Every structure is written in structure tokens, then in C-alpha cells.
Amino acid sequence: MQLTLRFTLNGETHEVTTSLRALVAWERKFKAKMSQMANQIGAEDIAYLAYESAKSVKIVVPATFDDFLNKVDGLPEIVSSDNRPTPGEPDDAS
């Protein structure tokens, strides 16, 4: 599952693509699998993926996720998704 997310922080708009690192960080924080997120993605999920993805590409973000939430302008927008199943999920060919 790969998402492209757009968010504005400190008046500057950024666009990031989720990385494996960001997805694993999400799984660890929320003790869930990506397949669960695909069925029920929430605001906190999107914001956390934007936060972790930004750190992966060296965008300067606040040190903590809660500080990021306080400073980001609104909910990060999902610009695109790849629609591929996450590993272990069946696809149409199965």
C-alpha cells in the first residue's frame, strides 16, 4: 500500500509518498496490520503516515507526533494511492 500525501506545515506545502519505514512505524505504533488500515483509515492514521514519511525524506518536522498535529494545517490530503494489495492480501488474480 503506497499513498502520496500532501500537507502544509509552517506555511510550506509538502508532498510525500509513504515508505516501508513509515508503514512499519505505523504498524508498530498502532499494533495493527496495513490490511486493517486499508479497510478503515482514520485521520490519525493519515497524519501519522505523513509525519513518518516526511521524516524519511528529511523534511523538518516537530520532534513529536503530537507537536506535528498541533502545527500541521488541517488533515493531510491523500493525493493518490497505488491500489495494490499489501503483502499477504489476495489480489484479483488469486
Image: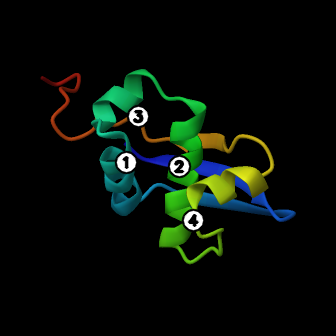
**Mark 2 is on which residue type?**
Tyr
Nearer-N-terminus badge (3/4): 4
Q: Residue 65, image x and y in percent? A: 58, 56
Given the image, on which type of amino acid does mark 1 rest? Lys
Residue drawn at point x = 42 percent, y = 47 percent: 2
Q: Which residue is mark 3?
A: 83
- Label 4 to label 2: alpha-carbon separation: 10 Å
Which residue occupies 33% across, 37% down?
Answer: 84
Structural distance between the alpha carbons of marks 2 and 1:
9 Å
Q: Residues within 10 Å of mark 1 (few under 14, many from 20)?
A: few
Residue at position x 27%, y 36% in the image: 33
Secondary element at image label 2: helix
Q: Which residue is mark 4?
A: 54
**Label 3 to label 1: alpha-carbon separation:** 23 Å
Q: Secondary structure at mark 1?
A: helix
Instruction: Compare marks 4 and 2 and give the one earlier in the sequence.
Output: 2
Camera-side mark, 3 or 2: 2
Q: Amino acid at mark 3?
A: Asn
Tell me the distance, in whole angstroms, between the alpha carbons under discs 3 and 2. Answer: 20 Å
- The secondary element bearing badge 3 is classed as loop
Which of the marked residues, 3 or 2, is nearer the chain's N terminus? 2
- Where residue 61 sits in the image (x, y, percent)? 65, 69
For badge 4, the amino acid type reads: Ala
Image depth: mark 3 or mark 1 in front: 1
Check the image and report above or below for 60 versus 80: below
C-beta proximity under 8 Å, tags 2 and 1:
yes
Residue in the foreground of this view, choosing between 33 and 83: 33
Residue 63, by quadrant, is bottom right
For the rendered model, the colour scheme is rainbow
